[in-house]
Image (tube, rainbow, N blue to C red):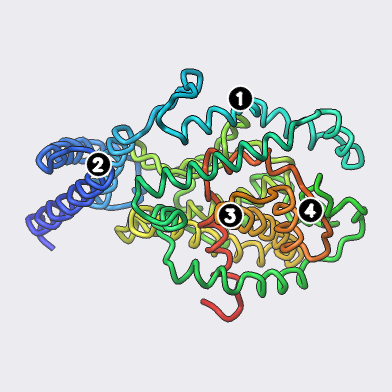
Amino acid sequence: MSNNTKEIMLSRELESICQYYLKEFKRARKTVSLSRLESIARKEAEKARRNYLTLSRPKTCDTSTYINLWVRESLENKFYLETLSKVNLKKQNSNNSNIFIKRLSEFYKILPFELIKPLQVKIFQAPLSERHKVWEDLHIQTVDIERKMQKLLIARKRELSKINQLPFIDIFLKKYKIPKRDYKEFNENIDNLIKDINSRLPKTQNQTKDFYSEFNLPCFICQLTFFPFNSQKEVVNFVAKEYPVIKRFNKKVKIIKDKEKTTSTIYRKETDTIEITMGNEVNIRHQSVVLIHELGHAISIITNLAKGDDLIFSKGKYGAEKEAIKIELDILKKASKQLYQAFLGEVLITFCKVLFEIELNRKPRQNISKLYAKSFNRCFLGARQKENYLYILEEDLITSPFRKLPHAVALYKLLYKTKD
């Protein structure tokens, strides 16, 4: 392919990117001209072209893929900044016209956001047998919190549906690029998969009577008598043996530990590197499993970029999680059959939280503590919870609704035996 032909194709791709973001701005009711977006795209493309020449080898992708990715990220950042709604809860009052902001302010007055993490630490750092007493001694206003949350969820549902002109769940299916047919299958067959997973969970020897209590997230990984990894280095070496792309790009995959941040993997366009940030995982076992998942993302990103595909843009969060989880499951199976089986307990926790959130947002006016217990019992068939108030410590319910939905549907698609 000649250089002239490549330039023509690149120009068409950049025009397509600008058209995409023009539609996104219009959908968000923000005024921006196509010529303005094209001007930004040209300037950013030139920056990308110059920066590409400075990148160390091996490079993850060719020039045109790199330029497209750079321009998309720049326009995405512009879209995000210009459509971001700024909220100052301290200045809200009862006369505020936005009912959602008012309800959010009311909720955080009774349960301040900055108290949630300290409460989590106080409860879960206590021995399991003492957590109920710790909870009781906190004297948390659970009834008032539940009422405030119900009102908040109703207001948020109405507000987002109005802005997006979509049914509430469809907003998140679109956001994460989850096909409706996959979500429909998930809802129809999830209980069959849950039953199958429960039958495959490893037998544990040290399971106390509180293992399925409301003050414990059952962990089969920590119950294993043998664990195949003793360090982060061992995990990386094992993954690199199974997926040599990690060895080839070992200088481009950066692993950073930061207890103050959430575990994540991102592509840094300025340096053409994959940055894995490891958050505050409880022990080496969970650090290992989380790192395997994040390395799955790294493998997926590098593999797709080599093919000229920006995965997040083309397949969304759902597609990215599905590819990473597929790699993760493969590595866990090869590392240890027992570890793979124990990991299925983590899958059930994900299903529990997502099924709870789906039902809660479908019908906010219900006893939330009973629903949380019901969702837990639905996923862990040996559980007999009646009420569970720990949902109030689930930050994502308020700050990042349906954050785990793409993970849950992807896990279903990869694990349900009769599906692909």
Q: Which mark is residue 29?
A: 2
Q: Residue at x 10, y 55 (%)?
A: 3
Q: Which mark is residue 363?
A: 3
Residue position marked by numbered label 4 in the rendering = 218
Quadrant of the rendered image containing residue 349: bottom right
Q: Position of residue 168 (x, y in %)?
A: 45, 53
Instruction: Say whether marks 3 and 4 touch (CB < 8 Å).
Output: no
Q: Quadrant of the N terminus?
A: bottom left
Give whichever of discs 2 and 3 has the lower sequence position: 2
Which dot, 2 or 4, sits closer to the camera? 2
Which sits in the foreground, 253 or 260?
Answer: 260
The reply to whether residue 401 is visible in this rendering is: yes
Q: Which mark is residue 9?
A: none
Crowding at mark 3 (Cα within 10 Å: few <14, some 14-19, many 20+) = some
Crowding at mark 4 (Cα within 10 Å: few <14, some 14-19, many 20+) = some
Give whichever of discs 3 and 4 has the lower sequence position: 4
Amino acid under disc 1: Lys
Residue position marked by numbered label 1 in the rendering = 109
